[in-house]
Amino acid sequence: MRELLDQLIEKHRPKCREGEVPGYIPILREQNPLSLGITVISTDQEIVSAGDCPVHSTLQSISKVFALILAIMDCGEQEVFDKVGMEPTGDPFNSIYKMEVFSHAKPLNPMINAGAMIVSSLIKGSSVSEKVGRLLYLVREMAENDQIQINEEVFRSEWEHAHRNRALAHFLRELGLIDDVDETLEVYLRQCAIGVDCVDLAKMGFCLAQYGRTYSGKQLIPPSIARLVKTFMVTCGMYNASGEFAIKVGIPAKSGVSGGILASVPRRMGIGIFGPALDKKGNSIGGVAVLEDLSREWNLSIF
C-alpha cells in the first residue's frame, strides 16, 4: 500500500502547479502549493501515510459534515431539513443565487455556505463557546485526538475578511432562518478553523465508513446519521464538481478550501488528503487526481 501511495503522490505533485492557493483568506495564501499528502486507514486498521502528511491544515468546509451530524443528533432530521434542503446545486459554494432568483425558502443543501450556517445555528448550546466546544469534542472523538484545537490565527483572518459570508448570514436572518448573525457566523468560522492533519481526516473518514464506529471501536454516531451524511458527501461534498467526482471517483468525500479532502469508503477505509493548490471549483487539484487513480487501482467506487 505504501509503495502505491508514494507513487501517486509523486505522480500528481506536479499537477499542483496548475492550481492556486485561495487568495480571499489571507493566511491560507501562506501555504505551500506543492504540498501533497495522504493517509489511508483500512478495515484491518493499518494506517499508511505518504507525502506531506505532518503538515497541519484546517477543516474549512469539511467541518460542515460534523456540524450536520451534531445538529441532527441535537434536533432530529425533521427540524434540520425544515430549514435546509437535500438537493445538489450547480452553483459555487458561497452563492445564494437560487434562493434569490427562484424564491427558494431555504438553501438547497447543508454543504453550501448558506445551508451550513443554518446547520451551525442549530447546534445546541447557550453560547458560542459551548456550541463550538461540543463540535470540537465530536471532532476529537471521531479522530481520537484530544490535541485538536481551533487555529485562532486562521479564525481571525477569516473573521476579518468574511464579507460574503456575513452578507449571506444577514440574508438568512431576513428570511427568519437564523436568529443571530454574529453568533451564527462566529460558530461557523470557528468550526472551519479547527486544525487537523491527514491522519485525523482519515480517522474521521474511517468512523463514517464504519457507520459511526471509531477506529478503537466506540459507537459514537448513530448509523443512520452516518449513512445520511455520506449521502450528502456523494451528492454535494465536492462543491459544484460533485457529479463529475462521483462518476470519476465514486467515493463519498468532502473537500475544504484549505486543500483538505476527507473520503470515506463504506465498510472499507477512511482517507485523508492535504493539497492546498485548488482547482477553479475549490477542490485540491492534486488530491482529486490522487483519489481518482486510487479509486481505479483499488476498485473503490461505491457505484
Image: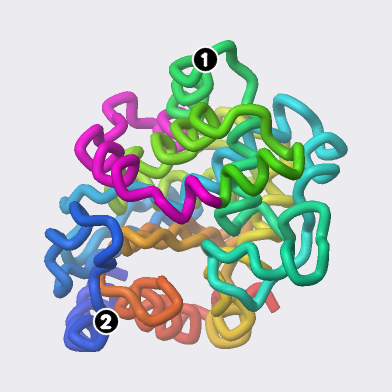
- Quarter of the figure with residue 225: top right
Residue 300 point in image, percent of width and height: 55, 75
Left or right for 169, reference 83: left
Main SS, magenta region, reads helix
Q: Residue at x 70, y 60 (%)?
A: 231
What span is colored magenta in the figure? Answer: 139-167
Write the residue at 57% across / 51% down. Answer: 168
Residue 61 in the image: x percent, y percent?
Answer: 46, 53
For residue 235, above or below residue 190: below
Query: Visible in this render: residue 47?
Result: yes
| Quarter where residue 104 is shown | bottom right
Work out which quarter of the rendered image holds the C terminus and state it.
bottom right
- Queried whether the magenta region covers residue 152, the answer comes back as yes
From the viewer's perspective, is 172 left or right of 53? right
Q: Amino acid at mark 1?
A: Ser
- Look at discs 1 and 2 and give the one toward the viewer: 1
Task: Estimate how packed mark 2 is, as few (under 14), some (14 to 19) or many (20 or more) residues with alpha carbons within 10 Å.
Answer: many
Nearest to the observer: residue 242 or residue 170: 170
Q: Which residue is mark 2?
A: 19
Secondary structure under tag 2 reads loop
The residue singled out by tag 1 in the image is 127
Q: Percent position (x, y) of residue 103?
A: 82, 63
Judging from the image, what secondary structure is the residue with disc 1 in? Answer: loop
Q: Is residue 166 above or below residue 142?
A: below
Left-right relation of 45 to 22: right
**Residue type at tag 2:** Gly
